[in-house]
Amino acid sequence: MLSCQRSLFDIPHDVAYLNCAYMSSLMNSVVRAGEEAVRGKSQPWGTTSQDFFTQSEHTRALFGELIGGGADDIAIVPSASYGIAVAAAIGRKTRNANLRAPHFLGVRFPDGIPENLLKKLANKNVYVSIRGSSLRVTPHLYNTDDDIDRLFTALDACL
């Protein structure tokens, strides 16, 4: 099991962010890479058309290695939804399906979601979302047991 990776993210200790399906926090290293990329775009004359292919091929090779494959197993697409649609259309399955695990939790209340529950939880630094008739809890690798305890303590206080 992967150990907690919270130190790699800029998440205050008193925040239980359990809403990564909505938007996950970026790793500190990703923020730095993004800042560097934005600085590069401020002077576009320094970027050649070949740079687009060099970086993407390097990225494909690294990710292929990460999943036990190669660059040819990786496609770079303009959006996740487009990539999933294409994969579904051609019947592509995950190579290591046994390594996948569910990480979405939908909490339903007998009388529906209590009014202002999201706001009340946010006031306690607990962040989740609503999807349909469920309170959606989507932890990520930066969440700790303390975050889950904070969620339940906040729910007890808000209900």
Image: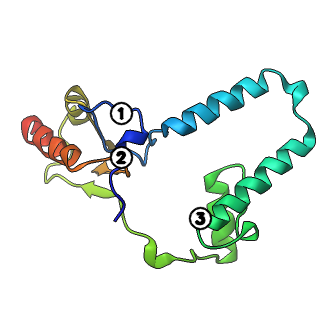
Would you name the residue on which mark 3 appears?
A: 66
Q: Are marks 2 and 1 in contact (CB under 8 Å)?
A: yes
Would you name the residue on which mark 1 appears?
A: 11
* Location of residue 36 in the rendering, given as x and y in whole percent from the top left corner: 68, 29
Which comes before the other along the chain, label 2 or label 3? 3
Q: Are marks 2 and 3 in contact (CB under 8 Å)?
A: no
Q: Are marks 3 and 1 in contact (CB under 8 Å)?
A: no
Q: CA distance from mark 2 to mark 1?
A: 9 Å
> Tag 2's secondary structure?
loop
Q: Nearer the viewer, residue 48 or 86?
A: 48
How many tags in the picture?
Answer: 3
The image quarter containing residue 73 is: bottom right
* Location of residue 148 in the rendering, given as x and y in whole percent from the top left corner: 20, 48
Within 10 Å of the Cα at label 2, are there few (<14), some (14-19), or many (20+) other Cα atoms? Answer: many
Would you name the residue on which mark 2 appears?
A: 142
The answer to whether 62 is drawn above or below residue 7 in the figure is below
Residue at (21, 54) in percent of width and height:
108
* Location of residue 31 in the rendering, given as x and y in whole percent from the top left corner: 55, 33
Q: CA distance from mark 3 to mark 1?
A: 26 Å
Within 10 Å of the Cα at label 3, are there few (<14), some (14-19), or many (20+) other Cα atoms? Answer: few
Residue at (22, 44) in percent of width and height:
147
Which amino acid, mark 3?
Leu
